[in-house]
Image (cartoon, grey):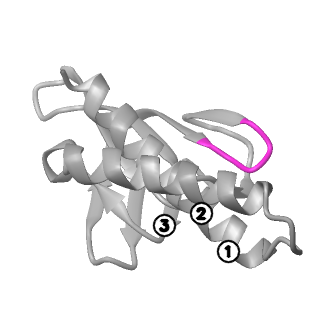
Amino acid sequence: MKIKVLSFSGENFAHESVTSLTVMTKSWEVTILDNHSPMIASIEPCVLYTKYKDENGIEQREDFAIWSWVVEVNNSSVKVMADMLIDVEEVDLDQAKLAKERALELMDKYKHAKDRVDMEKFIEAEDMLLKSIAQLKLYDLKK
């Protein structure tokens, strides 16, 4: 199966011999195999797991931290559009940890606010948390 991952940050990944792809949708985690039923789904910030055969027919694995957008499966072809695509070498561990801590602080602050909670700010903090968790999870996988 073919895969093409495009991101608004300019990072891309494509391969012609993908054996599986696993991604977290808004509803559940899904693993896509060859001849998967057609689908379109929104994705969450997560680790995108890909397995593919290299030029020698040996199965390889490449994982990325991705941000929200959409996955489309059609005719043994998978297209993923993501806000951002990060390889493990690009993960700034200290920055990801700081972002996670900051997001948790902001969410706690908004959750316990005596005034009305600004839901837009709370959702932004939650998104920051999910992005940092995806990066930390990717980093832990590669240790």
Q: Residue at x 39, y 69 (%)?
A: 6
Farthest front residue? 114
Horizontal side, residue 21 vs residue 136: left or right:
right
Q: Quadrant of residue 74?
A: bottom right
Whether 23 is among the magenta residues is no
Amino acid at circle 1: Lys
Region in magenta: 24-28
Image height of 49 relative to 5, above or below: above
At 21% from the left edge and 46% from the top edge, which residue is drawn? Answer: 94
Q: On the rendered image, what quadrant is the C terminus found in?
A: top left
Residue 2 shows in this picture = no
Alpha carbon distance from label 3 to label 1? 22 Å
Q: Position of residue 43 (x, y in %)?
A: 64, 55
Between residue 45 and residue 15, name the one nearer to us.
45
Picture coordinates of residue 1 (x, y %)? 45, 43
Q: Which residue is the site of mark 1?
A: 121
Specify the principal SS of the magenta part: loop
Of pointers 2 and 3, the one earlier in the residue sequence: 3
Above or below, comparing residue 57 to residue 17 in the picture: above
Q: Secondary structure at mark 2?
A: helix
Asked whether, in this view, residue 71 is left or right of residue 84, the answer is: right
Disc 3 packing (10 Å; few <14; some 14–19; many ≥20): many
Q: Nearer the viewer, mark 3 or mark 1?
A: 1
| 54 to the left or right of 9 | left
- Between the C-alphas of marks 2 and 1, the distance is 6 Å
Answer whether residue 26 is magenta in the image. yes
Q: CA distance from mark 2 to mark 3?
A: 19 Å
